[in-house]
Amino acid sequence: MDRNTPPDLHCEAGGVRRWLRHLPALLGLVLMVAAIGVVWHEVRHLHMSDIRQAMAGIPTWQMILAAACTLLSYFVLSFYDRLALIQVGYGHLPFRRAAFAAFCSYVLSHNLGFSAVSGAAVRYRLYRNWGVDSFAITQIIAFCSATYLLGAAALIGAVLIWEPSMLPGIGGRLPSGLLAVIGGGLWVMVGLYIGLAFRLPSVCVRQWRVNLPSPRMALLQTLVATAEVAATASIAYVLLPADAGVDFGSFLAIYIAAYTAGLVASVPGGLGVFDGVMLLALGPYMAAPRILGVILIFRLFYYIIPLFVAGLMFAGHELFLRGDAALARKNNADLSGSAAVTRRPSQVVRESEATFSVAVATGTVSLCGVLLIGLVLFDHAPGQSMLPDSLAGVLHLGGTYLLSLLGVALISMAIGLSQRVTLAWRGALALLLLATVLTFLRGNMVFVPVVLGLSTLFIAPYRACYYRHARLLSEPLSTSTLLSLLLLLGCVVALATRDDLSASWWQMVFASSMRGSARWTVALAVLLALVIVGRLLWPARVAVSPWGDDALQRYHALPHALADMTAFQPEGYVMGEAGEAMIPLRVLGGFLVGLGDPAGDEVDSISAIWRLRDLALQQGLKPAFWCVGEPFLRIYDDIGLSIWPVGDESGLSFCYPPADIGVASQHARLYREQGKAERAHPSS
C-alpha cells in the first residue's frame, strides 16, 4: 500500500452484514405503516371533539386508580434489577440504586424502542459508576431479558390455553386446540428453565464461569415478570367503562397481544402498532373514541410522564457526577508528588459520554414533535392570548399550522441528536424555545408550554454530549448537498404559500376538502423536508490520514505516545475533534484496531477514541484497541468494549467487544509474533 495515500478501510464482508442489520428496522417500519392504516380506517369518520369528550368522561377515581397501577408497575419492575444484582454477586448495592437503574432503563426502552440496545446503554452507564464490572453488567442485562421472557411466556401460554378467542387476528381463525398446544409448549419451556437449575448450576463461557439462577431464583423471576405485566395491563384496564363487558383475563390477552406486536415492530413505544391492535380487539366492546381516550391516557401515565421524571432524576444524577468530577480535579491539582503528576483527568468520571442523556434528549424532542403535530387533539381552541388583538388574530389563524410544521422539524432534530450532532442540539434548542413562546402567547393550555420549556432544560446542559459535526457544515458543498438545499427551499416555499392556514398540515392531507393535487403537495413537501433535514444533519464521514514518516514524527512529538512501535504496522491515523490528539490504526480482519492510547491532549484524546469508533461503524467494522493503559479504560468501557489482558510479561491490555473477546487472544498472539519478527529483522 502506498504510504502517502489514505487507506481503503472498506470491508466487503461487512457490506452484506450492514444490509442485514436493517432488516429488523424494515420489518418494524412495515408493521408501523400497516398499523397506522388500521388506526386510520377505524377513526376516519371520527371528529377530534369525540375523542376529547371520551377522555373527559373518564371519572377522576379511575384516573387515580390508573396512576396507582403505574406506580405499582414500576415498583415491581425494579425487582428485575434487584434479583439480577443478587444473582451476579452485587446484592450489597442498595435497593434504591437497582430501582433507579431499572426505572431509567425501562423508561428509555419503552419510549425509544430497541429495548435490548437502549436499556443496555443505561445500565452500563449507571452500574459502571457504582463499581460493577463489565462482565457482571452483561449478565445483569441477560438476566433481566430472561426474566421478561419468562413472564411473557407464562402469561401468553395461559392466554393461549384459556382465552385463545380474545387474540386479535388469530383467535377466530386458528383451532383452539392448536393454540392450546402452543400455550402448553410455552409453559413447558418455563418449566424446563426452572428445572434446569436443579441439574446445571453453572456454565463456562470461554474463560468465565457463569452461575445460573437457582430454582428459587428462577421461580422468583417468573413471578416478578408475571406480576409486572399484569400490573401494567391494569393501568389501561381500570380506565375501561364499567359496562364494557371485558373481564381482566380477556383484557390481559388483548394487552399482551398488542404489546408483543409493538415490541416486534421495535418502534418507539409501539407507536401505531399497539394502538391498532387495541382498536381491533376492543372494537366489539366499546366505541372507538373511548378506546382512543384510554390509549392516550395509558401512554401519558406509562410513557410520557415517566420519561420526564426519569429525565429530571438522571439530570440530577449527572450534576452530582459533574460536581464530584470538579472536586476530584481540584483535589488532584492540590496534591503534590508523583501521584498527582501521573494522574490524568480522564480517570475522573466524565459526563460528556452520557449515553442516557443523549437517548433521553432524543426521545424527549421526538415526543415534543409529536405533541406539536397532534396539538389540535388536546387544545383545539386556544384560550386568551397575551398579544394585541391584531397580532393575536394572525397567530391564531396560522399558529396551528406553524406549530405542526415545527413538530416535524423537531423530529428531524431528534434524528441528529441520536447521532450526537452539534448542529442538531442547537437547532432543537432554538425550535423548542420558539414553540414554547408561541404556545404561551397563543394561550394554549399551560401543560403545553411547560412541557416544551422543561424539554429545553433537559437538553441544554449537555452540550458536551454532542461532539460530531453535521455533514452540511463539515463536508465540501457537493452537487447532492446543493440539490438537497434547493429541494428543502422548495419544500419551505410550498408549505409557506398555502391559502388556508387554519388547520395543521396533516388535517389538510387527511381531513380537509382541498383538491387532490394541493393535498398531496403538502404531504410530499413535509415528507421530503423531513428526509432532507435528516440527511443534512447526519454526521460527516470521519477522515483517515495516511501513515508515513511525517505522521510518525508528528505522533512521537505528542505526549503519551508509545515509545516502541516495532510490533505495529499502522495503515493510517485519526485525529481528535480539536486536532490535538492522534491514534494510529490498522484493519485486522473485521476489526478496526487503534494502536495504543491516544497521544496528545487528554481532553481531545476522548473525542479521538469516539471518532475511531465512529469510523469503524462507518466502514462496517468492529472497533478494538491494542496496548492500552489505565487512564482511558473508562472511555473504552463507555463505547462497549471489554478489557482483555495479554497475560505476558509486557503487561499490555487489549479492548474488544464482549461478543468477540475470544478474538483478542488470537490477535495478542499475532501481536507478539509481529513484535519478535520486527525486532529480529528491523525495517529500514
Image (tube, grey):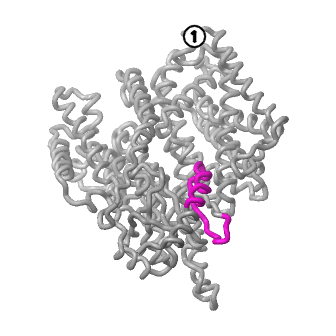
Residue 560 placement (x, y as % from top left): 50, 78
Q: In which quadrant is the C terminus drawn?
A: bottom left
Q: How crowded is mark 1: few (under 14 residues within 10 Å), some or many (20 or more)?
A: few
Q: Nearer the viewer, residue 532 or 444?
A: 532
Could you tell me which residue is drawn at 59 percent across and 56 percent down?
Answer: 664
Could you tell me which residue is drawn at 53 percent across and 71 percent down?
Answer: 680
Q: Can residue 426 be seen in this view?
A: no
Could you tell me which residue is drawn at 24 percent across and 39 percent down?
Answer: 502
Q: Name the residue under label 1.
A: 174
- In the picture, measured across the screen, residue 655 lies left or right of residue 415, that is right
Residue 657 in magenta? yes
Q: Give the range drawn in magenta.
A: 647-670
Residue 183 placement (x, y as % from top left): 68, 19
Q: Which of 658 and 321 is in front in this view?
A: 658
Could you tell me which residue is drawn at 72 percent across and 27 percent down?
Answer: 189
Q: In the displayed image of the protein, which residue is found farthest to the front?
A: 681
